[in-house]
Amino acid sequence: MGFHNHLTDDELVKMYANGDNEAFDSLLNRYKSKLYSYILYTVHDEDTANDIFQETFVKVILSIQSKHYAPSGKFYAWITRIAHNMIMDFYRQKNNENMVSDDAENGQILNNERLSDPSYEMQQVYEQSLSDVVVLYKMLPKAQSEIVFMRFYQDMSFKEIAEELGISINTALGRMRYAIINMKRIAAEKNISFEMK
């Protein structure tokens, strides 16, 4: 096991895919505490967090064994995104609120230069407390929540997000704009401060 500790995540993934179960144990030990803490912080319930944590690693195992993980040096980002999707699925079952559609035609919003500046958009998100952002973004439709998650929690550029999701940068920016609109609306309903200055 000590030998495994000196290997990169991608090396361990490759070894596990080739039948080395101890390599997976090393990956699990490397990230289980951090990932579980993230899940628990988001869902605020230990039983739910345990379920989502276990489901996440079942999906990780199946994905690695079916060769669906592409080595990129971002293993933790990948498993966190899987956990995030599991969390979104959990909340979506509980929450069917009407949201602004990603596909809604709104030229005024899409052409607003101030809102089109990614650094300005993210400044608005970063100004919120982390707990408030979690409350807001987990209630968004998946297409919008994953943009907020990738940009805010994983510090990915809009170019990287577009490549990861197979969409255009303009689409990624548009989804972020709609996400902010919806987050503002939810914040107003729940008396959370979320001001566009």
Image (cartoon, rainbow, N blue to C red):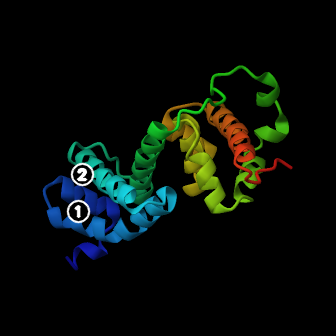
Identify the residue at horizontal 43%, vertical 41% (top origin).
Answer: 89
Q: Position of residue 115 (x, y in %)?
A: 79, 39
Identify the residue at horizontal 60%, vertical 42% (top origin).
Answer: 159
Direction from residue 12 to residue 72 in the image, left or right: right
Which quadrant does the N terminus fall into?
Answer: bottom left
Residue type for callout 2? Ile
Identify the residue at horizontal 56%, vertical 56% (top origin).
Answer: 153
Q: Is residue 27 above or below residue 59?
A: below
Instruction: Tell me the SS state at disc 2.
Output: helix
Q: Position of residue 136 (x, y in %)?
A: 63, 48
Q: Position of residue 103 (x, y in %)?
A: 63, 22
Residue carrying label 1: 24
In depth, the one of 163 and 27 nearer the eye is 27
Q: Is residue 133 above or below residue 33?
A: above
- Mark closer to the chain start, 2 or 1: 1
Q: Position of residue 144 (x, y in %)?
A: 59, 38
